[in-house]
Image (cartoon, helix red, strand yellow):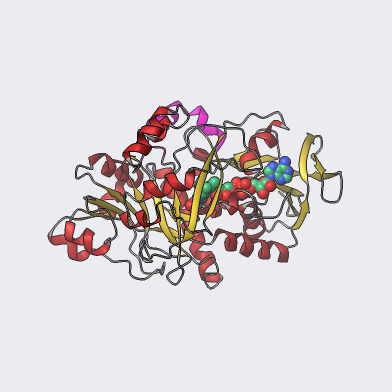
Amino acid sequence: MSSNSRIAVIGTGIIGISTAYYLARNHGCRNITLIDCGQPMAFTSAQSGENYRNWWPHPAMVGFTNRSIDLLEEVALESGNRISMNRRGYALATRRTEISDLVGQLHDGLGADAERLLRYHQGAASGSYHGFDKPDWEGVPDGVDILQNQDLIRSHFPGYDPEVQTIIHIRRGGDISGQQLGMHMLDFLREAGARRVIGEVQAISQGEGYRIELYGGEGTRTLEADRIVNAAGPFAGRIARMLGVELPIHCTFQQKIAFEDKLGAIPRSQPFSIDLDGQRIDWSEEERAMLAEDPEFAWLAGGMPGAIHCRPDGGDRGSWIKLGWAYNEAPAEPAWEPPLDDNFPDIVLRGAARLNPALKAYYGQLPRGMHHYGGWYAMTEENWPLIGPMGPEGAYMNAALSGYGTMAACASGELCAAWIAEGELPDYARNFSLARYDDAILMADLHDANKGVL
Ligand SMILES: Cc1cc2nc3c(=O)[nH]c(=O)nc-3n(C[C@H](O)[C@H](O)[C@H](O)COP(=O)(O)OP(=O)(O)OC[C@H]3O[C@@H](n4cnc5c(N)ncnc54)[C@H](O)[C@@H]3O)c2cc1C
């Protein structure tokens, strides 16, 4: 591909921006147009929890996210950590002592490296546990610490439910500023001569190259390109259909809350914490009875899934916290306006209070400045992304990044750019392309595996 090829990237969320960034940076592409109907990083990418980790139940996803974290580290180093990358890991807590299924998943993801990367702290070996007093991403061991020594758990995680028996501490994890990552890449793209165009893509036709019909911004017009990239986030399915392609993507709506932890309920050094156990939400008996009677709300009175999560936000000197719970699995047509559920703040607060009981102090009195927000997970059934050729020659996709698009942005941008520029492809390239659907054994395997939706 010539470096003068006209490349149009549809979508300036983190995925479109990262694709353009690696096209310019790794392949010298200079004729890139970034199209969006809104401002960059303003749709799904503005709703991200901005967490990252290399914990997945399949080696392809482990390799992919490890590569992405390597690239995030490069950005952190070259930008003086503009992206505020930290590394206190992911702490997965459970009240169980029998965890062979969880250890099995770790082995599935880490493969032959598991022996080297899993460290058990049950008794005498506890002294080797590397603490997490500092937020810095450098100098933290890779791998996973499995804590079952109760003294060790209580001393490092004093705020947790005393019933917690096991903590699986994924060390290569933390959070970043996704917005700053996008801005860093946009600054580079500006220097590299990329253009930004505001407009909604309404139709695409293919002849010699592509004709993209844009509406809005400076009026209706047509833009021509040799190659196009579909990075339209939740609307990637719609863009693909403009070219007669049906992508196996659906969307689910997920919500979070953030608020100032004025009462200091969550220690500032607490890692991103996930309560793995299912639960019944902490309602009073009367509340539970009322909910159970109402067909619309009865589900809230019964068992809820695990994976509620909580973390400090804004650094060690900040005072905000974020809570999330991706329990909604119902596919829905994506919309520009977020369908926020007014009950979500109370639901997630009570759910999170199970692992961090000090949060109970906020029952019925969440701070007024509480921010309730949400966005769409665009995902495939098996929760793997779609990156690579989309069908018609010269058309590519970088989509279905579900709840991990911020952490995977660098590797997915790099991978999509390599497909477009016909560069060298990494081992995992085929896994994330449409070609995986031809591999019946892989697909059956993925359907059985833990999808790891967070
Ligand atoms: C609540 C929530 C929490 C999350 N937490 C995390 C997390 O902790 N860590 C993590 O790694 N990931 C997380 N994610 C996932 C991550 O935010 C997404 O995977 C990522 O932002 C997707 O980026 P994108 O560029 O594909 O989509 P978007 O950011 O949605 O960008 C797509 C862009 O395409 C534009 N567009 C669409 N259609 C058109 C059209 N027809 N014409 C012109 N422009 C168009 C849109 O305006 C938009 O700007 C979370 C997501 C949600 C919803």
Q: Position of residue 36 (x, y in %)?
A: 72, 49
Q: Residue at x 63, y 51 (%)?
A: 13
Lateral position of residue 285 relative to residue 392, left or right:
left
- Please say if 183 is above or below 167: below
Please name the residue shown 64% across and 60% down the image.
Answer: 25
- Residue range corresponding to the magenta coloring: 433-451
Residue 436 shown in magenta: yes
| Any part of residue 11 in sight | no
Query: 95 and 55: which one is in front?
Result: 95
Q: Closest to the observer: 50 or 319?
A: 319
Give the farthest residue toward the left: 124
Query: Residue 129's quadrant in the figure?
Result: bottom left
Counting from the top left corner in percent of width and height, residue 371 is at 54, 55
Q: Is residue 438 above or below residue 58?
A: above
**Which residue sits furthest front?**
286
Q: Position of residue 370 (x, y in %)?
A: 52, 56
Q: Is residue 149 magenta?
A: no
**Quarter of image, res 442:** top left
Side (left or right) of 209 relative to 349: right
Specify whether 435 is left or right of 454: right
Q: Is residue 181 above or below residue 227?
A: below
Q: Position of residue 387 (x, y in %)?
A: 58, 42
Describe residue 152's horizontal placement relative to residue 66 as left or right: left
Principal secondary structure, stretch drawn in magenta: helix
